[in-house]
Every structure is written in structure tokens, then in C-alpha cells.
Amino acid sequence: MQMKYSDRKSVYGWAMYDWANSAYSTTVMAGFFPIFFKQFWASELSVNESTFWLGVANAVAGLLVAVMAPVLGAIADQGSLKKRMLLTFTILGILMTAALFLVAQGAWLMAMMLYIFGAIGFAGSNVFYDALMVDVAEEKHLDRVSSLGYALGYIGGGLMFTACVVMTVNPEWFGLVDKSEAVRLSFLLVPLWWGVFTLPLILTVHERGEGEHLMWGESAAAGWRQFVETFRHIRRLRVVFLFLAAYFLYIDGVGTIIRMAVDYGLSLGFRSDVLIRSLLLTQFVAFPAALAWGRIAETWSAKNSIMVCIAAYIGICIWAAGMETSRDFYLLAAAIGLVMGGIQALSRSLYARLIPIEQSAEFFGFYNMLGKFAAVLGPLMMGAASMLYGSARLSILVIILLFAAGALLLYRVNVESMDALKKSMYSSGSG
């Protein structure tokens, strides 16, 4: 069975979900929440304690998604429920993010709990968003379509973040009392943006088997059986298993840098305005870079391009450990923007190329499970290093081990052998 390429409208409708939910990952997860948590909700805690608890929050959210993702993916495949489950998790993320507006100063535990559930909504929706890619793109277009999604995400998230930063820097322009009120209002604007720009996907993307839904109970039972079978299947598919092991390690480093960069900068004594401007720089550099990596992969291959990105991230960690000035942080932000979109988009498209098409949601459930579970290790490693040794600079160097181990495993992934196996499966009618 071949992947279908629905039409340009469905491709852009699918990619617009990246535009929609990147407002959360940029403005809340990477931007305002770490700063507001440290300086407003957890202001009574020490710098190292707030870093530790932020790491715990990210780790708990990642762990819960990791446990749920494969089974949820299997259920969605059995009942053609990918769109409906995406919407369910999106609503969870929207409601939890909006509720942050109500959290009073000093209530760091409540803020952390809402953040955890909001992160679950964000990460859970991405399981089904990623899986829907094979419903809108032919295999030969996967790199470009995946890169398009990330590119729109960077520009959409960047625009939302820019608007919130302007509101925070100049609260009087908007009739607000101070910067704190502006940040709190951002926790309402982000879910509004997220909800509105989810509509194109709902209206234009049609998954295979749509209209042939099983009941939720039937889907759950069939999904659990399929989950067990898929796990056995992955163990037999050595190429897929190796890729997932590599991805588990190197994406840990990527996710940790995204989630902990602002907290790291604050721990080194950088001003919050420098960190905010650096995040904006990363977003707008990442937009053209993600599109460029989609084309570069057509020449170098997705695997080789990912290896280059991993090498760049190792250099970034070394650079980050020794930086001293605001100029260093800006250069670091630009460097991250150049490779962030490439490693994320090409990992997704390479995995989509390796897996059976008909089981995309459950296979992407494992993919997202490893991605989110990996985000458990990185923040905890940084938090623990910061608490044990009292050194934020040492904590960033620990991440190099994850990138290096991931690169060694990725090197052993034989993409060509999997392509040949899939062609054999489809030609024999077993796919």
C-alpha cells in the first residue's frame, strides 16, 4: 500500500498545527514559564532548588506521556481516532495553560502541577499529529513536508512570542499594570492562538479509514493487543529498533536544551531580557534553516544530515559551558536555531520512512514515547548536577554524553536495508 499525497491544502492544514502549538512550546515552555517560575511563583526558593523543581516538572510530564503514548497510538490506529485524540489532548493543553493565569505569587506547586498537565496535552497531541503526516504525504515528500511543519512552527511560535514580549516590555501600551500582569495575560493568549490555528487541520486533513470508527472500548482492547504485537514487531525490525535507541539518546539532549536553556542562562546570571531576545533569535533563524535542511537531506540523506546536526550540538554544549557575555548567548542562540529544526524534522521523516504505513500512529507512539521519556533524563541530569556540584556549567557538559552515544547508534542504522525490506513486503502483498 502506498502513501497518498492528498493535496496542497491538506499538507498546509496539517503543517499549521505546528504553527498552532508552537506558541505553547516557545512562549510557555521555553520562554515565560521558566522565568516566571523562578522569579514569581518560586521566588522563595534558591536558584538551584527552582532549577531542580523545574527539571522535575519536565521529567514527570515526559514520563507520563512516555507511558501513555504507545498504547494511545495503537488505539488510534485501530479506531481511526488520530484526529479525535489529537483534539482531546489539545483541549487539555489549552485549559491547563489558561489556568496558569489564575495562579498567585508563591504558589509554585500549583503552577508546577498545571504546567505538567499542560505539557502532557502538548506532548500527547504531538503523538497523533506526527502520525497524521503519512496521511497527507507520499514517502518521497516526507522530508519536505516534515520540514515545512517545523518551519511554520518556528515562525508561528516566534510571532506569538514576539507579541507577548512586546506586551511584557511595554505593559502600559496595553493598559496593563506591570510586567507580571503582561506575562500572566500571555498564558491566556497562547491557548487562544493554539485553538484557533488547530482548525485548519481539523477541516482539511482526512485520515485513512475515516468514517470507519470503532467504539472507544473496542479500540482500547484492540489497541492494547496491537501495542504488544508492535513491541514485538519493533524488536524484530533491527533497523527501526536501532534508530529508536539512537533517537532516545540524542533527542534527550535536544529537548533538554530547549526546556532548560532559559533556566541555565538565569543560573549564570544573564538578564531575562537577554534570554528572551535570544529565544526570539533562535525561532527566526530556525524558520529558514528547517526549510533548508529539508532540501539538504535530499542530497546528503536524512541520516547524514542528522549526524551533522548532532556534531553541531556537541559543539554548542562545549561553547555554552564557557560563555561569559550576552554576545556569547546570542551567538549560541543563533547556532541552536541553525540545527534545531533540522534534527527534529529529519528525525521524524526518517522514522516515517522506516515504519509500516498502516501502523503509523502506534509506531509514532513509540517514537514519541522515547522522545518524551528521554526528556526525563536530561532535565534530571542537569538538575542533579546543579544541586550536587553547585555548577550550572558542569551540568550542560553532561548532555554531550547523550549526543555522542546517540550518534554511535545512528551510524549503525542501515536505511537502505529497510527500504528493500518494505518494498519486498508490499510487493508480496503483506504490507
Image: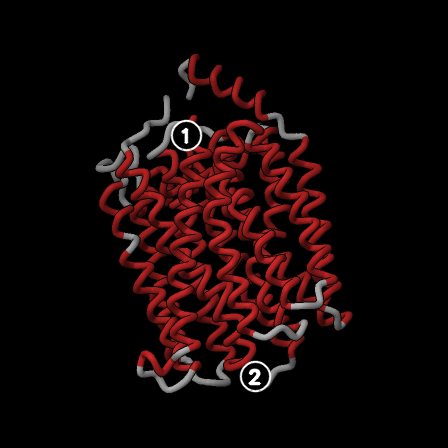
The front one of 403 and 174 is 174
Image quadrant for the N terminus? top left
**Circle 2 crowding by C-alpha within 10 Å: few under 14, some 14–19, many from 20:** some
Which amino acid type is shown beneath numbered disc 2?
Answer: Ser
**Circle 1 crowding by C-alpha within 10 Å: few under 14, some 14–19, many from 20:** some
Q: Is residue 72 visible?
A: no
Q: Is residue 57 visible?
A: yes
- Residue 218's place in the image compared with 325, above or below, is above
Q: Residue furthest top?
A: 428
Image quadrant for the C terminus? top left
Tell me, for residue 141, which label it has, or none: 1
The front one of 74 and 14 is 14
> How far separated are the C-alphas under marks 1 and 2?
48 Å
User: Is 228 left, or right, of 81 in this rendering?
Assistant: right
- Residue 60's place in the image compared with 14, above or below, is below
Q: Which residue is mark 2?
A: 43
State the residue at coordinates (43%, 12%).
428
Q: For the residue labelled by badge 2, is the local secondary structure a helix, a strand or a loop?
A: loop
User: Is 133 left, or right, of 263 in this rendering?
Assistant: left
Q: Quadrant of residue 183?
A: bottom left
